[in-house]
Amino acid sequence: MTGDLRSLLGIDVPIVLGAFGGLSSVELTGLVSDRGGLGSYGLYGYTPERITDTIDALRHRTDRPFAVNLWLPLPDEPGPDDSDAEFLTARTSMEPLFASLGLELPAPPPRYLPPFAEQIDAVLAAAPAAVSFVYGVPSAEVVAAAHQTGIVVIGTATTPDEAAALEKGGVDAVIASGAEAAGHRVSFINAAEDSLIGTFALVPQVVDAVTVPVIAAGGIADRRGVAAALALGASAVQVGTAFLRTRQSAATDAHRDAIAATPAQGTVLTRAMSGRLARGIPNTAIRTIHAAAQIAPFPVQNWLTGQFRTEAARRNDGDLLSLWAGQAGQLAYHLDADNLFTELAHGLSR
């Protein structure tokens, strides 16, 4: 087994909450941290001001360690000035989805995402216990600044090579994210389609590739998954879909119901909702976008679908949401996060 995540972070239980972009909640993050695990909160798309306010709210909710998550920018991400044609083509393909909600087609925004430099500055200033990253290795400057502030740095790998690159880059722990996991495949060395390694094969290879603690993620939803991950050498487990189904997450009831109703083989890997490969539950939005075959690159596609997803969430319309879910959704029995945490903790003694 690799190093101990508990001593690194000052937590009691090696259970980590998945960081949900757009679906994290202060309540769920705080609950997991209060139970002795590591609560995590996804900050995708947050402005610096919102980051500051969110971390402040988390500190008011719990006095235990928690992590926040940021997406690293990729060099080929288009901005509004260089993606107008792709924006307009993709927008036209989504016209039936906007029309079904009575929405006008949106105009291009001034920018798709807040600058990463501003986001990380806000995180460093707020100094949570840990910050995790997806889609690459944080720069040496970011890692050094985090360590100087006392922040633990966690990277995310989908292959052993990525894990080795993250350790070389100075991260303190690595999440080994198996192909079963919900949401985005955060590969950064090879294409996501070429980096689909199942958790059972990935975790021991990552454990062998690095000396830092390894957090197993993907397909873990009950005590059996926890026990298996630890047997494979992981220092801790990260659980996403099962927590997403609980009432404490920010998911809609339609999303929760879809998780419970979808078998393992019912999830799909798609670029339809964001422009990047992600695992979720097929619905009207995905089928309509696939049929049109006009998917813009990230973040253009993600911004466009976000314009109708916000209204769909307000209406609890699961046909027009990003229904992210992993392949263990039908093991997500618990609607209360406290009960789920208890179930997962039973796997630590098996």
Image (spheres, rainbow, N blue to C red):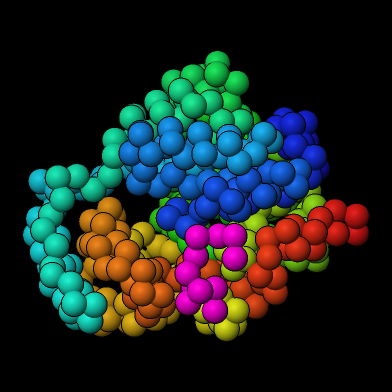
| Residue that protrudes farthest toward the front in the picture | 60
Question: Does residue 248 show up?
Answer: yes
Question: Does residue 198 show up?
Answer: no
Q: Position of residue 144 (x, y in %)?
A: 51, 19
Q: In which quadrant of the rendered view does residue 8 lie?
A: top right
Where 150 sits versus 50, above or below? above
| Residue that protrudes farthest toward the top in the picture | 148
The magenta stretch spans which residues? 247-257
Q: Position of residue 152 (x, y in %)?
A: 61, 29
Seen at 61% across and 73% down, the residue is 329
Q: Please give left or right for residue 198 compared with residue 182 in the image.
A: right
Work out which quarter of the rendered image holds the N terminus and state it.
top right
Identify which residue, 75 or 97, lies in the foreground: 97
Seen at 85% across and 53% down, the residue is 348
Q: Please give left or right for residue 144 compared with residue 247 in the image.
A: left
Where 345 sits versus 293, above or below? above
Q: Residue 251 magenta-drawn?
A: yes
Work out which quarter of the rendered image holds the C terminus and state it.
bottom right
